[in-house]
Image (cartoon, coloured by chain):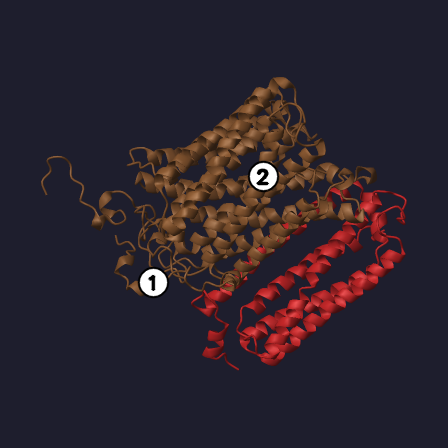
Amino acid sequence: MSVSPQAMHEALREPWHSLHRQRQGVSFGVWVFLASEVMFFSGVLLLYAMYRILYSDSFATAARESNIWFGTINTAVLLTSSLTMAVASEGARAGLRRLTLWCLLITALLGLTFLVIKGFEYREDITEHLIPGPHFKLPDPTAQIFWALYWLLTGVHAVHVTIIALVALFNFQAWRRLRQLTSPAFEGLALYWHLVDMVWIFLYPLIYLPGRSG
Amino acid sequence: MSEVTFDGAALPTKERTRSYLTEGHTLSSWLFTTDHKRIAILYMAALTFFFFVGGLAAALIRLELFTPEGDLLSADGYNRAFTLHGVIMVWFFLVPSIPVTLGNFLLPLMIGASDVAFPKLNLTSWYIFMAAGLLAVYTILVGGVDTGWTFYTPLSTAFSNSHVVTAAGAVFISGFSTIATSVNFIATIHMLRAPGMTWFRLPLFVWALYTVSIVMVLATPVLAMVLLLVMAERVLGIPFFDAARGGDPLLFQHLFWFYSHPAVYIMILPAFGVISEIVTCFSRRRIFGYSFMVYAMLWITVIGFMVWGHHMFVSGMSIYASLVFSFLSFIIAVPSAIKVFNWTFTLYRGSVAFDSPMLYAIGFIGLFTIGGLTGLFLAAVPVDVHVTDTYFVVAHFHYIMVGGAVSAFYGGLHYWWPKMTGRLYPDGVARFAAILMFFGFAFTFTPMFIMGFLGMPRRYYTYPPEFQIWHVLASSGALLLAVAYLMPMAYLGWSLFRGQRAGDDPWWATGLEWRTTSPPPKENFFAPVRVDNDPYEYHPEDVGPHHEHKEPFRTQGEVG
């Protein structure tokens, strides 16, 4: 199925003169924004690095309290969603409507699955008193820093995962033909979704793996 | 060599009188516009409001300090006043000021585009900014915040009883607006330059916007994260900087200044761009050392990220770290000095005209030089230890941020006002305001250098009587400065209704923004733009803008 000139025309937005250039512009803009996101996470990862060097034993003890099953399953879920998102983005570009719609739907559902699993994990963490504060499970106060970073990092990441709302919206728009498949926005959204995935690839070893080797 | 020529007077009347201002007069035609020029005006309205709010807090501070006793404000009230002044002026006026107003309006015009790369994102960023502004106003109304604009831990996380969370939240949200604008600018400059507008033909103002956007994209998120940590620690009680649980409050300072030192360059880089445009135009000369001006800004962009530690010489960093930061801070003075020299050399043998934008620009060069040189005092560890947290520091950064950035903002506003509104203001009054601003500023902040060096600490609302003479001088100067800031609002406002029509290019300037009508039409240009020449071709006379209307230059006795 080829892309009709009319479809290209409808996806073109001001102030661009060609869809090709608009597509480049959207990708470039998202890449610049991703640089910003990287700096956002690197600030708190610096904190993590410093505290882990200072309190390596206590970090190992604290990290063993995390539930590696939830973390590992979620990693698989998120990596798969990144695959379907990549397929959706390329499918949209090639004009493969059915493939794009299905892959967007699966991406959104996998993202939702991630959040649901994360919710069960949070419930377990709460019942086990892993929230830093007076009733914290572990005696060593520095272990609270690990869990403070856990809540902040996974929380901020989970907020990023809510971008699936946009995935679902694009899916709906593409389904109802309100958004042309030639729209560069699919690729922009895919780039962003891969960042969400990449951040998790950093978080998984930092949160679930310390202290589990021995 | 051909230059883009345009003669607005030759257009049919209907075309000539059509402009971005005439495309709809309803409120919604403004609030839902995606035209970068209208968004610039929306930003201008918002920033004027915040400039008043921040200025009001400054007035309270200067009034309180008129006498050594605390007679106007309580100790706590004074803390809240200077925090309000800092937070509003830094994040709701200075950081956005030139990029979102002049930059938004001019960037597409200067590169020959019809709009920024993502017009809807541009409008969204204004709404985000307004949401942040509302939260800031709410914070003020419910009692304000008393930590100082720096939000230092553990004061902000554990001890302050004021509204830290909403204040930090407002700054956090405004960061998204900054990032959105800068992503837009970077994409615009990369993707939408007109044919022939190569990188080294870009006006220096565009280069300034480019470099400042890079700093904004990379520095702002770090501030966002550190403020998020402060809010989380304060609201949820989870420890990041809590020394009782092994946290390190100093880490906050590192992350905060990793943003807030580059933030100084966020404020001053656009000002550099404005000054370069004005100085070339009013000395009728090509800018001296164009490529060095570009490399100097790029140099500042990179090194600006490596000097944050000079804010922390007395915070207990290792002496080795201090010396490295001190060395790098001296290094970053070099590109700034290159820029000052190049502006000066541009003036040299130029045909200098002292119109009001030029007076602001020359005032800028003087005040920025003093601000920069006193920065070197502070970059030297031993001197810094002596003057840390004194009025010397206050004077230094106001010379950069107010004497520098705000002067440049007013200069740029006067320079491009005819383009934005199509009207000329009375230049005599404007010149008076420009000179008054220079003197009012020097009057206000020069005494602060002296009292700071003598030991007057900052952020104190009472002081020993021997400092009173300096405080009285500063407070009186502040009155002059306030008048100088208010005057343009009056005559610029008047010019909107009664000002003379400006024509396309009242200054006979180079630059694509002058190759269209004033005010420009919604799509910016009447014909596709092609660029065949370098920027700032003012000289020699027979290639400068509008040379065809000028009498040819002849020396005495020459026959031709």
Chain letter, disc 1 residue = B
Packing grade of label 2 (10 A; few <14, some 14-19, many >=20) is: some
Chain letter, disc 2 residue = B
Residue found at x 53% / y 61%: B31
Residue found at x 48% / y 38%: B485
Q: Secondary structure at mark 2?
A: helix
Q: Tell me which corner region of the image, top left, top right, bottom left or bottom right, holds residue B162.
A: top right
Chain coloured red in the rendered structure: A
Instruction: Please tell me whether mark 2 or mark 1 is closer to you in this view.
Output: 2
Q: Position of residue A179 (x, y in %)?
A: 56, 74
Q: Is residue A140 visible?
A: yes
Residue found at x 39% / y 48%: B495
Q: Which residue is mark 2?
A: B56
Say above or below: B322 vs A61.
above
Mark carried by residue B97: none
Q: Tell me which corner region of the image, top left, top right, bottom left or bottom right, holds residue B194.
A: bottom left
Q: Which residue is mark 1?
A: B526
Say above or below: B417 vs A168.
above
Q: Earlier in the sequence, mark 2 or mark 1?
A: 2
Q: Amino acid at mark 2?
A: Leu
Q: Amino acid at mark 1?
A: Phe
Q: Secondary structure at mark 1?
A: loop
Work out how far the residue at label 2 is from the one at label 1, CA to CA, in angstroms.
44 Å
- Horizontal relation, residue B281 to residue B159: left or right: left
Chain coloured brown in the rendered structure: B
Say above or below: B452 vs B426.
above
Q: Quadrant of the C terminus of chain B?
A: top left
